[in-house]
Image (spheres, rainbow, N blue to C red):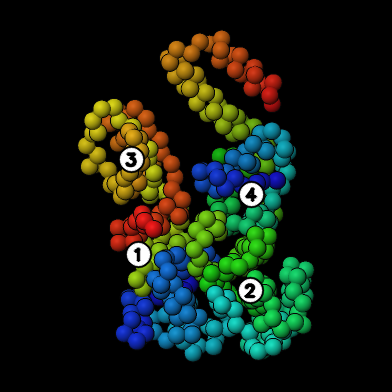
Amino acid sequence: MISLNYRDPRPMYEQIKDSFIKLILSGGIGAEERLPSVRELASQLAINPNTIQRAYRELEQEGYIYTVAGKGSFASQDKEAQNMKVKQLLEEFDALAQRLISYGVDIESLISRLRKGEEEQ
Amino acid sequence: MIELKNVTKTFDGFRALDGLSLTVPTGGIYGLVGPNGSGKSTAIRHITGIYRQDEGDVLIDGQNVYENTDIKRRVAYISDDVYAFLSASVKDMKDFYRGIYPQFDLKRFEAMKEAFPIDEKKAIRHLSKGMQKQAAFWLAMCCRPDYLILDEPVDGLDPVMRRRVWSIIMGDVADHGTTVLVSSHNLRELEDVCDHVGIINHGKVLIERSLSELQDNMVKAQVVFEGERPDLSSLNILHQSAVGRIETLIIKGSQEEITAKMSALRPLFFDLLPLTLEEIFIYELGGDEYELKDVVL
């Protein structure tokens, strides 16, 4: 379900967090679906349980998941919180696009780039 | 909690431990790293009650460890060279361990047969080095220890077995809050499993910190300045090197702080990279006359 890239310079908890965000936003993990327990994931990935705990804690703070004591963590239905991430990424995108335009890249070539990216997916 | 307070130990005039202090919090996974001959194994042999310190305290849960059977039966230890009695098989050692460790879990022993492809009737001494390590793990994990002390544990194990062993240990930590102290030179691997790290040299702990704190407090920056290099004295630079105009700096401090200070200097190019444990190890010891020297052969 989650796999780690050891060459990725990001800290491990961030990788785990991002993988879950991707899964939740794409519907790979449906609303109300249970996430693997900390123990399951710690033994499966052979990494420190605290790392997973930290990723889960942040996912919960950002509203992607919620925890029921004694039952585990579940993907939340709160689409609004989830849209926050999309909004944030869009803002980063805007800033990047602005910079590219200021470097003299014309808008048409940006659009064709996006089209190409879509086809490749 | 494991505590070593100002422990000294001298062998034949050689001071192996020189006022060593370290603390392993309960439920933590503590990585003990240091150059060869820095005193890692000696420290571990004090924690397991094999050596008696000359001075200082060696405590587990606030109690002295040396000759303390109540504490020692809660501690499992895998040494760097596995020891088994002459011609003893895994089965014989299991019976021996059961007599010593009251929490020994026979059910688990049977269940773990699948994980370790070892003939339990064969003498451990006749097994290969890696197989001996596996046998030691099998037995140690069945003791259901509260404290697991590992000296170069996965040395000699194949990649599949390493992962399997770590996976079993991580499961125990998550389930029972087992406290683990592990010494290793494989820093890449320690990075995955540890939450605390102690760097030791010359019988002393140089730094001891949680891994996230360690990694959040040091960054590698690559930077190119236009023209002359501005005054960087406001930054706490540990190490610097340059290839052409690109300078690589190891800086102490948080990412935000360094980003703010750097961008004020208007570099042409600026990139921050997190440090690996291996790099932290090298740079922390760098000032300690352990500098990486280019050895010409």
Nearer the observer: mark 1 or 2; the answer is: 2
How busy is the neighbourhood of tag 3: few (under 14 within 10 Å), some, or many (20 plus)?
A: few
The amino acid on which the numbered mark 3 sits, given as a three-letter code, is Ala
| Residue underneath mark 4 | A67
**Which chain is home to disc 4?**
A
Q: Nearer the viewer, residue B140 or B288?
A: B288
Residue lying farthest to the front in this orientation? B297
Q: Is residue A13 above or below residue A118?
A: below
- What crowding class fits label 2: few (fewer than 14 Cα within 10 Å), some (14-19), or many (20 or more)? some
Determine the CA span between mark 3 and mark 1. Answer: 28 Å
Q: Are marks 4 and 2 on the same chain?
A: no
Quickly name the residue at label 1: B206
Query: What is the x, y in percent for residue A81?
Result: 59, 34
Q: Is residue A33 left or right of residue B287?
A: right
Going by the numbered disc 1, the residue's amino acid type is Leu
The amino acid sitting under disc 4 is Thr
Secondary structure of the residue carrying numbered label 3: strand
Q: Which circle's residue, 3 or 1, is located before the other in the chain?
A: 1
Residue at 70 percent across and 46 percent down: it is A1
Which element is circle 4 on? Answer: strand
Estimate the x, y position of residue B15 in percent, counting from the top left. 33, 79
* Circles 4 and 2 in contact, beta carbons < 8 Å: no
Give residue B184's position: percent from left, percent from top: 50, 65
Residue, disc 3: B242
Q: Are marks 2 and 3 on the same chain?
A: yes
Residue B295 placement: quadrant: bottom left
Work out which quarter of the rendered image holds the C terminus of chain A and state it.
Answer: top right
- Frontmost of labels 3 and 1 is 3
User: How far is the residue under mark 1 from the one under mark 2?
Assistant: 33 Å
